[in-house]
Image: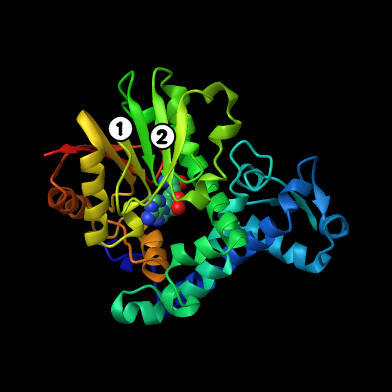
Amino acid sequence: MDDTGAGRFSTENEAAAFILDEIVGYMYAAALRAAAATNLADHLRDGPRTADELAELTGYAASAIHRVLRLLATKGVFSEQEPGRFRLTPPAAALCTTAPISVRAAVLMMTEPAMWRSAGEIVESTRDATPSFDRVFGMPMFEYYARDPQAVAGFHDGMAAWSDVENGPVAAACDIPPGATVVDVGGGQGGLLLEVLRANPATRGVLFDQAHVLGGNRLTAAADLADRWQPVAGDFLDAVPPGDVLLVKRIMHDWDDPTCVRILRNCRAAVRDGGRILVFDAVLPAGDVPHQAKALDLLMMTVLPGHERTEAQFRRLFAAAELSLVSITDVHAMPVSILHAVPA
Ligand SMILES: C[S@@+](CC[C@H](N)C(=O)[O-])C[C@H]1O[C@@H](n2cnc3c(N)ncnc32)[C@H](O)[C@@H]1O
């Protein structure tokens, strides 16, 4: 087979049919939304049930539940144990609200109208590589979320759920010196900072984000960390609180290059002598290699001014912010890397 995959198809019909399979693929994401919104996984926690039983429990239509689960089961999310009777599988269990690592809120966030409608307008974004979001909703995405308490809660709960999947492995892969003050820049609800403080007992933390986001933080409820952290509200486009280790996770991909350089320069000004800046983002592989970030990159194109980056693009950003890239560390089994930078 050559690099273009031409050898996969023995006829033109097969090659064309491949595109048809791909284009109906978005209904899989829609089915995940339906399952998450109707809490089907929660209702299967105690054992398999029929679509009729699930309809009784949820108030939704049995035939529709059957059709949603039947599609999801084609990729191992739920399984049709016997005709019309479904059970949880490990990925389906991650849709339960009480799962140790629940992705339910992340599914709802990624498929909510703000994202979905913007992605639907991708042709307009392709014209000039600017976000459809601003045209559809009349304002930039973070401004929209700042104005609507319900939408903002959905976004940050979803973002936190997404990050829960990677925070443990990311924290384990971080090198944090004892005694360091760790600042999580744009840290959202603080899931990463929580893991980092627990993994590094002799450290202190600062959770830095916009004021309306900090109210929903998770560290307040963590009694074991009571004296070890503080929330700081602010705008990372203006300034960043001082610290020894600055964490910048899934921030760069939200912004265009000049804005990233501005944020990184503010980080450079905030990092104490001998300190480090740890940027967590995907590093795009070259060529045809599949990577989750190649899809997230198009989401960024439609909702925000940002994009995912290659190593060379990160190097240029750091250089423009007078930072040296010391190393890039992959995070085990996660589509995110740690870019370790210091003042040049
Ligand atoms: C994609 S989320 C990443 C959150 C978190 N770092 C994580 O990995 O889950 C981007 C974060 O940047 C924050 N943010 C956006 N604009 C900001 C600004 N001007 N100043 C500070 N934080 C900002 C958002 O509130 C949000 O928490």
* Element at label 1: strand
* Residue 216 visible in the displayed image: yes
Residue type marked 2? Val
Q: Are marks 2 and 1 in contact (CB under 8 Å)?
A: yes
Q: Residue at x 19, y 53 (%)?
A: 317
Task: Classify residue 165 as left or right of residue 4.
Answer: right
Task: Classify residue 39 as left or right of residue 229.
Answer: right
> How dense is the environment of label 2, judged by Cα within 10 Å: few (below 14), some, or many (20 and up)?
many
CA gap, disc 2 and disc 1: 8 Å
Residue type marked 1? Gly
Task: Classify residue 5 as left or right of residue 219.
Answer: left
Q: Which residue position is annotated with label 1?
A: 243
The part of the image, by quadrant, that contains residue 327 is top left
* Element at label 2: strand
The part of the image, by quadrant, that contains residue 274 is top left
Task: Classify residue 29 as left or right of residue 244.
Answer: right
Q: Residue at x 61, y 32 (%)?
A: 221
Q: Which mark is residue 206?
A: 2
Image colouring: rainbow
Give the mark, 2 or 1, whose residue is nearer the N terminus.
2
Rendered-image quadrant of the N terminus: bottom left
Q: Nearer the viewer, residue 125 or 335?
A: 125
Q: Residue 239's spot in the image, x, y percent?
A: 29, 47
